[in-house]
Image: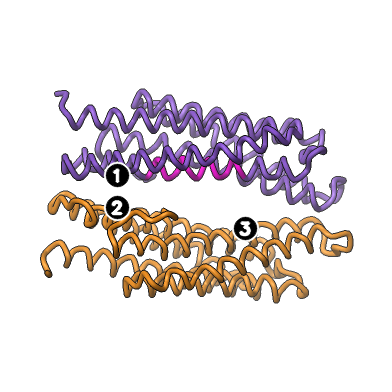
Chain colours: A orange, B purple
Amino acid sequence: MRDAFTDQLDAVHADLARICEAVRTAVERATHALFTGNAAVAEQVISDDAEIDRAREQLEEHAFELLSRQAPVAGDLRTVVASLRMVGELERMGDLSVHVAKIARMRVPQVAVPDDLVPMIGRMAQLAEEMVQQAGEIIRDRDAARAADLVPDEEELDRLRSELFRTLLAEDWQHGVETAVDIALLCRYYERIGDHALSLATRIVFVVTGQPSRED
Amino acid sequence: MRDAFTDQLDAVHADLARICEAVRTAVERATHALFTGNAAVAEQVISDDAEIDRAREQLEEHAFELLSRQAPVAGDLRTVVASLRMVGELERMGDLSVHVAKIARMRVPQVAVPDDLVPMIGRMAQLAEEMVQQAGEIIRDRDAARAADLVPDEEELDRLRSELFRTLLAEDWQHGVETAVDIALLCRYYERIGDHALSLATRIVFVVTGQPSRED
């Protein structure tokens, strides 16, 4: 049955999917700045983050209006509250993209990632961005079945992070302390972006079924 | 006017204050494990985190019941939703304590922090723990006026982190890559715990006034 509640909830979900796309763009551009040492692109990620914050505020206002006017219960209520949590995670993913962009900016005109680590960090960045894209599609289509698709990506991110840590802590590490610290932090940022993307996708199970999920 | 809603909201706030105290204990013990290399204490922080997660689930259930049965609007609604966000932050602070404990555990029987950095990392840990304690008191007393007290602590955390990064990236750094990475991550964990504590305290402004805050 379509009613005012359903329409308003659709609008909230469309907002979530749009913010997720803005976050995907932020991850993509931060990664581009990281690998090219392009200061202008890094600056853009940093300044555009305010738009993600504003979009979050607007979505929250819409969700509050919906709760106030419709006073949903049970599954509908859980759905709206889940949306509020999801937009909080999206904002955090935007912040993590800004952290990546700031590492890129700090090393301009050099690049923070040494050549021999570009494949591994590049793969982490690619996985993180793909996970954000998939989360956005899952939100848009409310396709809870696809949430499980993100699990292997998250596991690969975890393996890559472990491997990179082993590399930078090995006896034959040649790139010095500064690069090691940059790489450790980059690993953490991309892994957290992936964690949040998986969490977003998992919450959709909640939104579609109205039931609390184990991961929630 | 006292009514069923007020009583239930008081119960939610008492839960929040209790979880905040559990988080403070986690920060305290993780720091103890870090500076003493005590593996048993580190393990305890890691295993006790499940209790914080369970307490979060229970609080969420109480908040959902409250929203379902009472259908609050305006300021009351914002208060309940703010509580849901606050408990999400508390859970994350528990996770960050676990990260500190895992760094401690990884270096047993050594300690991760070299002697000359104990004062600075110790001060960061102390500030983070104090901020969690203050946030707990502010939640318990719903004392929005005290939220501003946490700002200087957060600024000091930020300064210490910058100073530690300068130290570990300096030419004369003697402790190698592994310690540098540990210190960089520890700085980040304590700083994030402090950020969340400030955010919790700031949300109380919201809870007391029912108005959105700039920082929210």
Classify the position of the C terminus of chain B by image quarter: top left
User: What SS does tag 3 mark?
Assistant: helix
Our reading of the magenta stretch's main secondary structure is: helix
Q: Are marks 2 and 1 in contact (CB under 8 Å)?
A: yes
* Quadrant assignment, res B10: top left
Q: Do labels 3 and 1 share a chain?
A: no
Q: What stretch is highlighted in magenta?
A: B85-98
The correct choice, above or below, for B32 with respect to A99 in the image is above
Q: Are marks 3 and 1 in contact (CB under 8 Å)?
A: no
User: What SS does tag 2 mark?
Assistant: helix
Please report the residue visible at 23 percent of the width from the left and 68 percent of the height from the top.
Answer: A10
Amino acid type of disc 3? Arg
Residue carrying label 3: A188
Residue B92 falls inside the magenta stretch: yes
Residue A152 falls inside the magenta stretch: no
Please report the residue visible at 86 percent of the width from the left and 64 percent of the height from the top.
Answer: A174
Amino acid type of disc 1? Val
Amino acid type of disc 2? Val
Total number of numbered discs in the rendering = 3
Residue carrying label 2: A81
Residue carrying label 1: B81
Who is closer to the viewer here, A107 or B211? B211
With A112 as the anchor, is A98 left or right in this view? left
- Tag 1: Cα neighbours inside 10 Å, few (<14), some, or many (≥20)? many
The correct choice, above or below, for A11 with respect to B14 in the image is below
Who is closer to the viewer here, B99 or B127? B99
- Pointer 3 indicates a residue of which chain? A
- Tag 3: Cα neighbours inside 10 Å, few (<14), some, or many (≥20)? some
Who is closer to the viewer here, B140 or A60? B140
With B102 as the anchor, is A197 left or right in this view? left
